[in-house]
Amino acid sequence: MVTLLAVVAGTLIALGFYRARTVALENVQQQMVAFSDRLTYRLAAISNDTSTLVGMIGSVPNSFLSPPRERLDNKVAALREALLRSRHIDGIYVGYPDGSFFHTVSLADSAWRQVLKAPAQAALAIRIIDRSKGNPLSSVIFIDIGGKHMNEVPTQPTGYDPRTRPWYFTALQQRGMVATGPYQMATTGALGMTISQIHRGNPAVVVGADVVLTTITDFLKEELLTPGSMAFIANEQGEPIVHSDPVMMQNILSALENRDVDAAPDNSGLSAKLASFSGNEGRPMRITLRGRDYLILATKIDNAVLFKGDRIVIAAPYDELMAPANRMAAEGLAIAGLIVLLGIGGALLLASMISSSLHRLKNGADQLQEFDFQTPIVVPSSITEISSLSQAMNRARDAIFTFALFVPREIVRKGMESGSFSSRTAARQQVTAIFTDIYDFTTISERYPPEDVVTMLSVYFDVLNQAVSAHKGTIIQFLGDSIFAMWNAPGTDDDHAENACLSALAMQAALAEFNEGQRLKGLPEFQTRVGIHTGAAVVGNVGAADRLQYTAMGDTINVASRLEGMNKTYGTSILASAEVKARCSDRILFRLIGFGQAKGRHTEIELFEVTGVRSL
């Protein structure tokens, strides 16, 4: 026994250790995916905001088609709110085919304010390059936060020509929304990109916006999983273009500025490995680089104009990721091992005394849970407490058996699970209710002795109960010769309306066989009418403190009862409401009867006869 327990304990400890590492790895992978998703969403948000503004300016005829100095107030009004609200947009500009240039700059950036020597109250700066007089002349107009012109810096010659910039000629070539960069902005030194497109009113005019990527680089630095982790955005060739390491980022920018791709850092060998991720985007992979294992996740960017087609790469040393989990697992497993060793001795002492008896008691409890009242619970034991418990379980079995004869078993099961039958509580929920009635039952009762009527009713109720139970329903009450059955309470049933209709059809089919037996015995046939309605009802335990009844109340239940009686008016057997049809018309066949007035209701009910089941 000791050897067996030791083997089992050792196996459990090994499985626990393996499971702990697996869970830790799954958590790490989820963190990496979440990090990648957050970065992707941030890129998409920045792209969408900027693209929407550029698209708005470039999609409809407006003042931006006129030369830079014309309709200046209209241009400022169109851009002022967008620039003040979107801090990631460095500036918005328009390049014209003659080399003229209109540029609106947000002065929230201290670098722009210092370079342009802007007044303290200025919120925007308008940079204009005018070529109307031949030589390009540059001037700056300062605008306050309310859109009012403050002052203008005198014109001076400039060598800037927008037609030579990548954002201009790339937009002309691709004839759509394009992104260029990233690059280090000449004026502010910030990392940025440009989103541009041609103006639909004049395909030689290009609208562009500079996007500051500081939030992206900060996000990469701050969200790293471990000290040795790295995150970067790589182009389709696997070359990093935005990096979480500031020094690495500066090297990348220097290489891009010099157009020296070979001078870009190889990112500790990660770039050479990116080609192997072409079929594994979105799934973390474990690879070995320079003798160290890394967990790497590469995710392609498809939902943003910025970096579209590039990939987000997250790489973290495997040993750093798993170090906390390994420590916790080792400590937990050491404690578990000690407890197991101590428990072996106690288990051996007690197992031979009580294990057999407890196993039998457990089987007896399972019998009660499954409503098996036929098998007695016999647990012979020299331990007084176990013997007493066995007797108590037999008494409980007899009590539950008797109780289950008067209450639907599903209600008994719920009471057993909750441990109490005495709570007077009710709650509103969606249910489907059925009411049945035997046509001309009063005449049958007058013609036959009460004993015969009770016998016939008992067999009849067996038939209905089987049809209800077979389709997940519960008979809540027997009301004379009628029954009240309900679906979706007390047990849940997502297809409660469909199952109720199937049950009603099953009742009619079973009653045909029942009535055949009645005819052979010379007894009256039972013609049953059924009403079905779906809706909200208050369901629960209702009654006095010492006498409860599980039932449902409300207009839904009343309508179901009225529908049963309306069968007599329309010569039908199964009447259902429009609410029932709406839930299961894809499976059940209905015939429209029309609108009818139910007794006691002010509004009419749309009536449908349940006629069968649709063939699949």
Image (tube, helix red, strand yellow):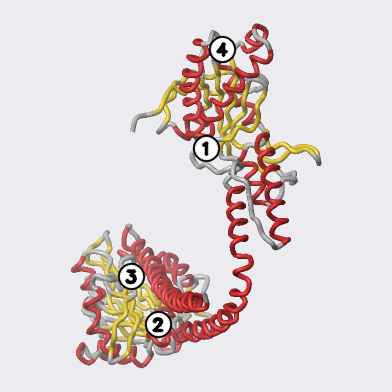
Q: Position of residue 155 (x, y in %)?
A: 35, 83
Q: Which residue is mark 1?
A: 472
Cα gap from disc 3 to disc 4, whole angstroms:
65 Å
SS state under label 2? helix
**In the rendered structure, which amino acid carries the disc numbered 3?**
Gly
**In the rendered structure, which amino acid carries the disc numbered 1?**
Lys
Which of the two discs, 3 and 4, labels the residue nearer the N terminus? 3
On the rendered structure, is 605 left or right of 64? Answer: right
Give the vertical position of 119 relative to 180 (above or below): below
Cα gap from disc 2 to disc 1, whole angstroms:
58 Å
Q: Position of residue 269 (x, y in %)?
A: 26, 88
**In the rendered structure, which amino acid carries the disc numbered 2?**
Thr
Towards the viewer: 59 or 464: 464
Q: Which residue is mark 4?
A: 569
Q: Which disc is residue 282 wearing?
A: 3
Cα gap from disc 2 to disc 4, whole angstroms:
77 Å
Q: Which residue is mark 2?
A: 217
In the picture, residue 117 is in which quadrant?
A: bottom left
Which of the two discs, 2 and 3, labels the residue nearer the N terminus? 2
SS state under label 1? loop
**In the rendered structure, which amino acid carries the disc numbered 4?**
Thr
Which of the two discs, 2 and 1, labels the residue nearer the N terminus? 2
Cα gap from disc 3 to disc 1, whole angstroms:
43 Å
Which of pointers 3 and 1 indicates the residue nearer the eye? 1
On the rendered structure, is 597 left or right of 68? Answer: right
On the rendered structure, is 423 left or right of 173? Answer: right
Is any part of residue 170 visible from this angle?
A: yes
In the picture, residue 244 is in which quadrant?
A: bottom left
